[in-house]
Each structure stands twice: as C-alpha cells, then as structure tokens.
Amino acid sequence: MCYTFFKLVRRKPSSSVMFLAGRDLSSGHHLSRRAMDVKWMMLANDSLIDREGRLTVWKVFNELAFARRPLVAAPFFVLVRYALEPTEATTVFNITVGLRDDQGALVEEVSTTHTAPDLATWASKTPIQRYRMRGLRFPDVGEYRIRLDVEGKTRAEERLLVRIRGGGGRE
C-alpha cells in the first residue's frame, strides 16, 4: 500500500535572509544557538520525495506484530520534518533516535549528526530526514516510544506497540 502524503511547499529565496540577526554569514559561526525544532515525525516502511517535491510514504505504522520470538524488527524508517530557521543554516546538530520501554528505560539508541542546509537550499526545500532503524530487538511485548533528541533535548516522540500476532498481550 502506498500513499502520496502531501506536496512540499517551496519557498522563494529572499535576499533579506542573508542579514538576519543571530548569524554572521561571513564567519560561519552562530552568535546564538538553539536546537532545530521538529514539525512532525512518523514511522514508515519506506518513503520517496519525487522531483515535484511530493512525499510518498509506504505503510505508516505505530504497531509491530510478530509471529513468534525473538522480537526483532525488520528495517524501517523514522521520518522527520524539521523546522529550521535561516540562522541555523549549515549548523551541525547532534541527533539521537532512541527506543524506550513503557517505563522510559533506554532499550536501543542510534546517534548521528545532521547538517542543516545552506541558505539557498533552505529557501527551496523542506528538510525531511530519514533515519533507518534496523535489527531493533524488543525484550518483550508492550508499549515503546521512539524518541528523537536534538542536541540532547527531546523534540518528538512516537508511540510503538509491540505484540505477538493473534495473542495481542504477553505470552
């Protein structure tokens, strides 16, 4: 099953963007720093952004059903649309995508960096990132959270229910 989700909005570049407060474009350093925000996050089997800027997503989900143990997930993606400010252009952000159980304890974690686009790219594209999750092992059935942290601050969380097919609950 495949859904075309929406058309990404393209903004026209503006020369006034080059002189925004908080960023010295000549030196490449930030005068003040704030971590980028997240507009939305979802779990999906795969996705594609075509030439016209339409995002196509295959199978959005918030539940994994396993036939039997061990509870090891097939690869999937965490899709994130960031809300960036022009002052954040070319900034490198530390990103952590973590799997937490229903008590909040960390089960698994993936860390990476994300470089915000330059001003020309920022003005023409909506930043969407795909984080591939593979081989996640769930210790038991139940409710989990996929949590996205930017610079150590939680920016988004998505609920994920893990169950045994036909059983629904614990074995």
Image (cartoon, rainbow, N blue to C red):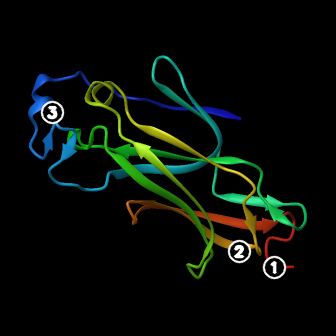
Query: What residue does disc 2 label?
Result: 142
**Residue at numbered disc 1:** 170
Q: Does the rendering let one see residue 11? A: yes
Residue found at the far top of this picture: 51
Q: Which residue is mark 3?
A: 26
Give 158 or 15, whichever is nearer the viewer: 15
Q: Is residue 82 above or below residue 155?
A: above
Quadrant, the C terminus = bottom right
Residue contact between numbered discs 2 and 3, judged by CB atoms under 8 Å: no
Q: If you read the primary sequence from the N terminus, does the residue marked by circle 2 or circle 1 appear first?
A: 2
Give the alpha-carbon distance from disc 2 to disc 1, as whole Å. Answer: 8 Å
Q: Is disc 2 in contact with disc 1, using a CB cutoff of under 8 Å?
A: yes
The quadrant in which residue 156 appears is bottom left
- Residue 152, horizontal then vertical, whole percent: 40, 65
170 to 98, vertically: above or below: below
Q: Which residue is depicted at the point 12% across and 47% down?
A: 22
Image disc number at residue 147: none
